[in-house]
Image (tube, coloured by chain):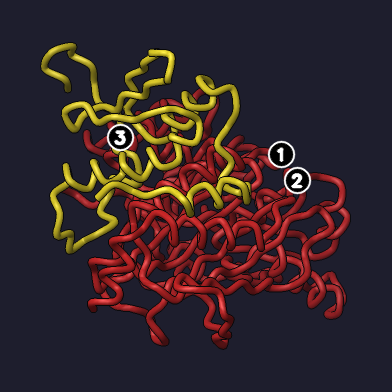
Amino acid sequence: MCGLCGALGGPAHWTESAGRLDATQTRRAERLYQVRVCNALLNTQRLRLDDWQGSALVLSSATGKREVLSSLPEVWAMAQAMAGTAIDPLDPALWARLAESEVAP
Amino acid sequence: MTAPIAVHLLTGFLGSGKTTLLNHMLKSPEYADCAVLVNEFGEVGVDHHLIEALQGDVVLLPSGCICCTVRGDLADVIRDLHERRDAGTVPRFQRMVIETTGLADPTPVLSTLMHERVIRHHFCVGTVITTVDAVNAAATLERFPEALKQIAVADRIVITKTDLAEPEEVRALRASLAGINAVAWLLESAGQPPAVALLMGEESNECGEGGEALPQRAPERGPLGAHRSLLRPETRAHASGVTSFTLDLDAQVDWTVFGVWLSLLLHTHGKRVLRVKGLLDVAGTDRPVVVHGVQHLIHPPSHLAVWPAGERRSRLVFITQDLEPDLIRRSLAAFLAALAPRTAQETVSA
């Protein structure tokens, strides 16, 4: 439960479960890496994702709209609402753009 | 903390032999530690065997099995039964079987089990058992998309009435079912239903670290770059556009990139991705990671202790509807190649 707002946390998204059993990185570092990977995709829609204290995600648009979210499915749904179109992982044009992008170390 | 109680789903189209299988479960001592949730007592003929009516819609059968009707919200019934189990007013059942109606899509039931805030702490998803009628299956599959989905999400497919069908028909049906769902075990039932261990044996789902190996097939090679992924359609696609295919990945997989890719794929095309199941060779661990999902519901991934017999490599089986398998293969390869620099470094340095 969040000590500030009293909100009950939902179940962890499956991507947060132990994908890497012998993880050499902390949970926080993994989360930041996930945000960087997401940003490589979201940048194609001029959107940006930030981690908030390891407990929430903040999605921002180029026009200043911001939404606090809790999981990847919410990020994709909100990104679609903000950009007006979905990021389609099966679109070859997206693959070409990803190939040119870099995930920040 | 006590182990979660496995909940198995029994589904199947109208007249497919679901009730016959249920009747067996309710009478057999093999299911003595089982709580069975049915639609109607009358349908399964439970009245003749009733020895003790417990409170509410729950009865205790001579076999020791608890039988309960679901009249309202399924989640309420499961929570109530669990409370009674803890209070000792019903026997301490170790397994649960839920019968869905013939026209039902099993996915919402799975969603309740995985996400309801009380239930998910005490129960886990077991196997999805789908009955298919050997005599009428072909016509049913052609006319009712619900039946197709019940087959696609199954872990066990029980072909019933095989004694009433021609052997040639049964063989053709088996081939057709394997084309729709390549990960389910195909079992036959003519009179005597399959053993409990076959129907409800532990497997690689959220209930534990079972060890069901995916079907082993001869490896093939292709010049597809660092993240070479190989695509093998199991059989021809069903006329409905539902097909099974296998993706093999040569390099170790970056878990983060894979998770982002699959979550995005399910967001944009979830209705057409009926099933994902397989083992991943994840960078950073020597143990295989089990991935298992039904539509947009992905089980919490688990680790097997060791790789099943055979080579160590990622292998995913997809069941999709009207989605080009090659697009999925190329998409995953593109994501891993572009977004997983760490994996490439780890693979090279290993």
Name the amino acid, label 1.
Leu
Residue carrying label 1: B103
Image position, residue B137 (x, y; %): 81, 59
In front of the other: B230 or A91: A91
Tell me which chain appears red.
Answer: B
Q: Is residue B95 visible?
A: no
Are discs 3 and 2 both within one chain?
no
In the displayed structure image, the side of residue A18 where residue A94 appears, left or right = right
Q: Residue at x 70, y 52 (%)?
A: B323
Are discs 1 and 3 both within one chain?
no
Q: Quick check: B2 above or below B70?
A: below
In front of the other: B268 or A62: A62
Given the image, what chain letter belongs to the residue carrying mark 2? B
Given the image, what chain letter belongs to the residue carrying mark 1? B
Q: Residue at x 85, y 60 (%)?
A: B138
Q: Residue at x 88, y 55 (%)?
A: B139
Image position, residue B10 (x, y; %): 57, 50
- Characterize the local packing of mark 3: few (<14), some (14-19) or many (20 or more) Cα atoms within 10 angstroms: few
Q: CA distance from mark 1 to mark 3?
A: 30 Å
The quadrant of the rendering that contains the C terminus of chain B is bottom left
Q: CA distance from mark 3 to mark 2?
A: 35 Å
Residue B46: name its quadrant: top right
Instruction: Say which mark, if any, is on residue B14.
Output: 2
State yes or no: discs 2 and 1 in contact (Cβ < 8 Å): yes
Tell me which chain appears yellow.
Answer: A
Which mark is in front, 3 or 2?
3
- Characterize the local packing of mark 2: few (<14), some (14-19) or many (20 or more) Cα atoms within 10 angstroms: some
Residue carrying label 3: A11
